[in-house]
Amino acid sequence: MKTHHTWFITAMFIFLLVCPIWAAEEGEKPKEDEKPKTIAEFTKDAERIDGLFTLFRDRKTGETSMLIKREQLDKEFIYWMQVANGVVDAGFFKGAYGPSKVIELERHFNRVQVTEKNTAFFFDPANAISRAANANISEAVLAVEPIVAEDEASGDIVIKVDKVFGTEALVQIKPSPDPEADPKTTFTLGELSEDKTRILNLRSYPANTDFEVEYVYNNPAPTVPGQAAVTDTRNVSIRVMHSLIEMPQNDYQARFDDPRIGFFSQQVTDLTSVEAAPFRDLITRWNLVRKEPGSALSEPLEPITWWIENTTPVEWRELIRNAALEWNKSFEKIGFKDAIVVKIQPDDADWDAGDIRYNVLRWTSSPNPPFGGYGPSFINPRTGQIIGADIMLEFTFMNRFQRTRRSIQDPATSIGSQVSAGSGTQYCVLGQGLAMNNVFASAASAVYGYTDELDQQLTRDTMHYLILHEMGHTLGMNHNMKATQFLSPDEAWDKNAMKDGILAASVMDYPAVNFAPTREQQSLFYTIAPGPYDDWFIEYGYSEALADPAAEQQRLDAILVRSTDTLLVFGNDADDMRLPGAGIDPRVNIYDMSDDAITYASRQMDIFQTTLNGLASRLPAAGKSYQETVEALNVILIMWGRSADVTSRYVGGVYVDRAMVGQDGATVPFTPVEESRQRQAMQVLAKQVFAPDAFQFTPELLRIAAPQRRGFDHFGKTEDPKIHDLVLTAQKSVLDHLLNPVVLKRVSDTALYGNSYTLGKVFNDLTDAVFEADARGNVNSYRRNLQTEFVTRLAAMVKGEGYDTAAVSMAVYSLDRIEDLLDEKRNLDVETSAHVQNLELIIERAFSADAPMSKPV
């Protein structure tokens, strides 16, 4: 015990002697009067990259530092990020653009903080209240770093930036968790690994400095594996390009947005205004200036120059170039010659497409592409000036393999579901729609006996349309989902009606493929030139400004008042009807065509049926599997559902007019769709979607609808076609809209200001469409599914959840009427008898004691 006691005292003595030394080393700091290292001392062993910001990279550790000149402190710069390479499972893809922000580098004693400025508000400097600017407005401190080196004479300083750019300090990359997502089925990123994350590349030019960073997210025990593109779900890499950009110093004049025309914009609210709409939203556009101001036709001082990336298939380059140059027609009408210039990137170019100094038409071929084309741009948030842009194009949009191999076995995985699910995102999914259009058009061409020449035209028209559309985005254009309301259905199939290559008022819609029933009627598949709306858009955004502000405003107003011209119709994604209950104006929609979209959709459904009838004898070619047949069958049914959806949107619809008060040609803002048009829609749905013979499949077609075996892809599912489910999926989509609580409430509301197609008429006509054709006889299997779906929905409505009183009452009334119809059935086959008993049981349960509403007497 004594020995142990002596040892303990000795150990404590040593600890007390050493501990202060450890403490001094652990907390060692520079003395107050100690000068920081000079920049030359600190960077003597580092690689130097000069540019807007000079960068230093330690040759041993790779640690990165950045020099900030005295004049760069407290000065605004633009920060912008782009995904250099991503993982679609996690919501990232190559070429995706992130936000543009205004930041300042601010020195606070011995530290530098990166602050994001708030650009959402305006204060008129002539108004005294502007002295209170920024009250209750929070700017964001994104990062803080200590100064590690300084030159007193110049005032230049150096900070380390690995933690600034190697973390999510500047921008959130990993999405916040969705509280409604199922963790058992949702792919999620793990935690950011500081050890594995690294700055890959540094580039600095006179006007911008770029940091390419590989973020690695680590999840040691993932529950949801990624698709084939994810090599190891435990370690997922996302490469991001961060750019610091010098604030443009030029004579760019901001131009303001207007609800009648569809620009992307920066929303700015005037907090010194007393107007009801105190908006100073800035349109996004390029700084396009004439070399010869005032002349009839002039080249720009600096054209909008595009480079076709050298990854582009050689055989398509000329076609792409010609399509892009079509935009010069619109610019020539406002006095610009060669506003758009297109070049091809040399194979030995010393720059790559990620260099923000170049606007590039880029191509990728992804295993799970999120789009067919995507045309983003980045801007100066202070003014709306577009600084640069890219167009991302997916090679797979030209393929006939549409990832539908599982949808015939499981309709819930169909392309239609994928496209709809992405409709709320910020990127364009036009290419996916065009790809499906063309799978159908290729199959229909074979059935209708079209020539190779028309097949080549389909490729040309598709490529022209996609390039024109995505380039439109880079010019600042919103979608215009009203643009196909242009020609009549007959004119759409009249070659003489579109000699100028114009099938729609704008290239910014998502159109149906304009497939005609005969070779003689086949005109354009898609519009291949900017339309009248596009010319008007370019005029407002890019025409030469007048020097006098008052005269300039009058000039712009004179352009805008033409919005009531039927050739200049506009409605963007904020208004569209693609999802049930969304939007109100049925003319603002996707995958429609003509100024009578109901008639056109009905004709398209006839073509779909004819194509289905001929598939078995036309596809596939000898020596091939039946995969092409499966693709065609699935896509045709998806497109059938599209046409049905387009038709259904007229029921309960409201025409919207955004013209200003007193504007020539203006109507009132809201006009309910005519009863005759709503009834027409319901009749088409009754005949071509709900009727007993609405969908017809030959036994020969169903016997060959076999996806090609690939490994164990069929594991867990049977490979036979689930035709009943496919048909019901299209029918359910229509019911989703017609029985949507928002739509039903709107039917009641609009009855107060002109809608004569009342809720009672809607429910009576819909019930007739689902039951009348076989009210007293046997019911086929498609109709049994439909009737069960309809009655089940009405029964749920009786419970009242989410529905107003008027809709609930009509559900009660309709169920009672259906019960009377069922009572009249006699001499039924076994399947129909069982079906009737099931419907009666559903209705009985709807009116059971636990329901909040009892069956009417």
Image (tube, rainbow, N blue to C red):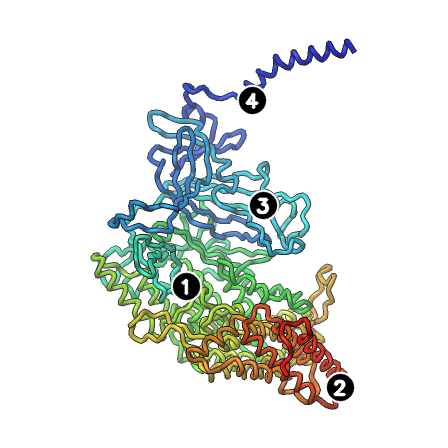
What is the x, y in percent for residue 142? 46, 40
The nearer-to-camera label among 1 and 3 is: 3
- Distance from disc 4 to disc 2, alpha carbons, whole Å, reads 89 Å
Which residue is tagged 2? 829
Q: What crowding class fits label 2: few (fewer than 14 Cα within 10 Å), some (14-19), or many (20 or more)? A: few
Which residue is the site of mark 1?
Answer: 322
Of residues 832 and 372, the one drawn nearer to the viewer in this rendering: 832
Residue at point 53%, 55% (across, down):
364
SS for dot 3: strand
| Residue designated by label 3 | 237
Give the residue displayed 65% in from the left and 74% down from the top: 792
Q: Position of 647 compared to 666: left or right?
A: right
Cα distance in 3D space between marks 4 and 1? 67 Å
Q: Earlier in the sequence, mark 1 or mark 3?
A: 3
- Compare residues 334 and 180 and report the one nearer the observer: 180
Can residue 610 be seen in this snapshot? no
User: Dot 1: within a 10 Å radius of its alpha carbon, few (fewer than 14), some, or many (20 or more) residues?
Assistant: few
- Amino acid type, mark 4: Glu
Quadrant in the picture for the N terminus: top right
* Disc nearest the viewer among 1 and 2: 2
Viewer-nearest of discs 3 and 4: 4
Sooner in the amino-acid sequence: mark 2 or mark 3: 3
Q: Secondary structure at mark 4?
A: helix
Say what amino acid the circle numbered 1 marks.
Asn
Residue 281 in sight in this render: yes
Identify the image quadrant of the C terminus.
Answer: bottom right
Residue type highlighted by circle 3: Ser
